[in-house]
């Protein structure tokens, strides 16, 4: 099974169903559309100022990008709070979190035409990959990841 590494807090947002799209500058490989993949949280430490600004933007509905505009606030805010609150339970890093199905991609501009979904200048060429039917594992599985798609080294029971 293929895996895709995503920075936190976005990996956890995808697995919670709070981030319905992963935005990338390329389409996913055709062979992976409709397929289940592992979502892997990167090892990169979450920058708390970035996480707090994202939390405030979603909480206050100051949606200046397609990413914040497509987050589902009720599900996203508890995860974003964990990403920046000093006393909160940290989000997992360098670990597989569960699986999703990659849906049929579309241009971010197609989503941005909906009211309330802005598209920043640097987002004009983005692809929106639907992240469908997330199945979160009970515990994260610690594994070093890689950029792009890579082979998940463990058996996955779906």
Image (cartoon, rainbow, N blue to C red):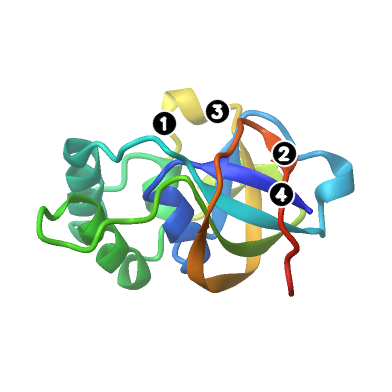
Please provide percent x and percent y for residue 70: 45, 55
Residue displayed at 23% across by 60% down: 82
Q: Evaluate if marks 4 and 2 touch, with contact meaning CB atoms under 8 Å apart.
A: yes
Residue at the image position 31 percent from the left and 37 percent from the top: 45
- Marks 3 and 4, Cα distance to the nearest angstrom? 31 Å
Task: Find disc 1 in the rendering and name its residue.
Answer: 120
The answer for how far apart the CA atoms under marks 4 and 2 are is 6 Å
Label 4 crowd (10 A; few <14 / some 14-19 / many >=20): some
Task: Tell me the distance, in whole angstroms, between the alpha carbons under discs 2 and 3.
Answer: 27 Å
Q: Residues within 10 Å of mark 1 (few under 14, many from 20)?
A: few
131 lies left or right of 73: right
Question: Of discs 2 and 3, which sits in the foreground?
Answer: 2
The residue pinned by badge 4 equals 152
Q: Nearer the viewer, mark 3 or mark 4?
A: 4
Residue 115 visible, this angle? no
Mark closer to the chain start, 1 or 4: 1
Mark with earlier residue (2, 3): 3
First along the sequence among labels 3 and 4: 3
Cα distance between the residues tagged 1 and 4: 34 Å
The mark total stands at: 4
Above or below residue 118? Residue 35 is below
Residue projecting furthest to the right: 31
Report, in whole angstroms, how far the alpha carbon at label 3 lies from the one at label 1.
7 Å
56 or 113, which lies in front? 56
Q: Secondary structure at mark 4?
A: loop
Q: Kindly state the secondary structure of the residue where label 2 is placed.
A: strand
- For label 1, the SS is loop
Residue 124: which numbered mark, if any?
Answer: 3
Quarter placement of the N terminus: bottom right
Rendering coords of residue 157 (x, y %): 74, 73
Judging by the rendered image, the residue that carries numbered circle 2 is 150
Q: Secondary structure at mark 3?
A: loop
């Amino acid at each position: 099974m293929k895996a895709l590494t995503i920075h936190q807090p976005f990996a956890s947002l995808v697995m919670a169903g709070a981030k319905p799209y992963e935005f990338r500058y390329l389409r996913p490989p055709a062979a992976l559309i409709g397929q289940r993949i592992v979502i892997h949280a990167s090892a990169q430490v979450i920058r708390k100022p970035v996480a707090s600004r994202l939390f405030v933007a979603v909480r206050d509905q100051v949606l200046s990008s397609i990413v914040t505009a497509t987050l589902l606030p009720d599900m996203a805010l508890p995860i974003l709070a964990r990403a920046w609150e000093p006393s909160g339970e940290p989000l997992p890093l360098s670990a597989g979190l569960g699986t999703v199905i990659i849906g049929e991609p579309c241009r971010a501009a197609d989503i941005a035409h909906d009211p309330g979904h802005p598209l920043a200048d640097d987002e004009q060429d983005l692809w929106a990959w639907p992240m469908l039917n997330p199945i979160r594992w009970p515990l994260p599985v610690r594994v070093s990841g890689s950029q792009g798609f890579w082979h998940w080294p463990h058996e996955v029971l779906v």
